[in-house]
Amino acid sequence: MRVLIADDHAMFRRGLKETIGEAFPKVTFAEAKTAQETLELVRQQDWEIVILDISMPGKSGLDILNDLKHLRPKLPVLFLSMHPEEQYARRALKAGAAGYLTKESVPEELKTAVKRVLTGGRYVSATLAEKLASDLRRGADLPVHELLSDREFQVLRMIASGKTVKEIADELSLSVKTISTYRSRILEKTGMKTTAELIRFALRSQLVD
């Protein structure tokens, strides 16, 4: 079994390898520290599973997932994130992820998730599964940030991290006008009036590191 671990923290990658190796003694690993490395390795080789951090240098994990799905539509991707499930899990699963775990998950849960994903299943924690079921029963409204497209969500996070419109435009290789349009859409969809409100909302909702 070949597993690709995409995370920019060496110690965390090491811990993942040790945990997964306990469950799959014959596993072989490769590691990627950036989005570009991740995509190159997927282009070059076949993998049984990719374990992907949602916060990668250069591109968000959600953007990388989109690229991976274009390269290899059937490749299962398991997200690991420091962000709470309720903030990202729905979006990740909707984008095609096979599962979502927080980095605080215990090793046994990671092993269970990998096994389920490898057999073609999808994995969310029992806590998130119960919340999703409860939301369906109650007909609960989605969180405000779930109304945003993936690109709008990315721009919101970048605004909340303190980047200017020009800095965001440069980083995403888009025009300042396009980013300003995204900002206007975000304000409209969230019902907020100012950038300061957006920043407070994102921080309160733990949408930024």
Image (spheres, helix red, strand yellow):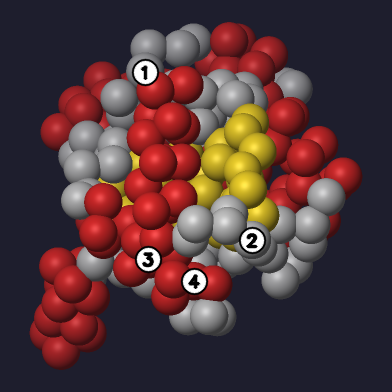
> Dot 1 surroundings within 10 Å: few (below 14), some, or many (20 or more)?
some
Residue pictured at 52% horizontal, 49% vertical: 51
- Residue type indicated by callout 1: Ser
Residue 117: numbered disc = 4
Q: Are marks 4 and 3 in contact (CB under 8 Å)?
A: yes
- Could you say which is closer to the camera, residue 157 or residue 180? 157
Location of residue 118 in the rendering, given as x and y in whole percent from the top left corner: 54, 72
| Residue furthest out toward the right | 44
**Residue 186 showing in the rendered view:** no
- The secondary structure type at the circle numbered 2 is loop
- The three-letter amino acid code for the residue at tag 3 is Ala
Q: Is tag 4's residue or tag 2's residue first in the polypeptide sequence?
A: 2
Q: Is residue 81 left or right of residue 122?
A: left
Judged left or right of residue 80, residue 52 is right
Residue 143 lies, in percent from the top left, at 25, 58
Query: Is residue 195 positioned above or below 54 on the image?
Result: above
Q: Label 1 vs label 2: CA separation? A: 38 Å
The image's mark for residue 161 is 1
Seen from this angle, which residue lies furthest front?
25
* Amino acid under disc 4: Val
- Residue 113's disc is 3
Q: Which residue is mark 2?
A: 1
Q: Earlier in the sequence, mark 3 or mark 2?
A: 2
Q: How many marks?
A: 4
Q: Nearer the viewer, mark 1 or mark 3?
A: 3
Spatial separation of the CA atoms under disc 4 and disc 1: 33 Å
Q: Is residue 95 above or below residue 87?
A: below
Q: Earlier in the sequence, mark 1 or mark 2?
A: 2
Q: Amino acid at mark 2?
A: Met
Q: Are marks 1 and 2 in contact (CB under 8 Å)?
A: no
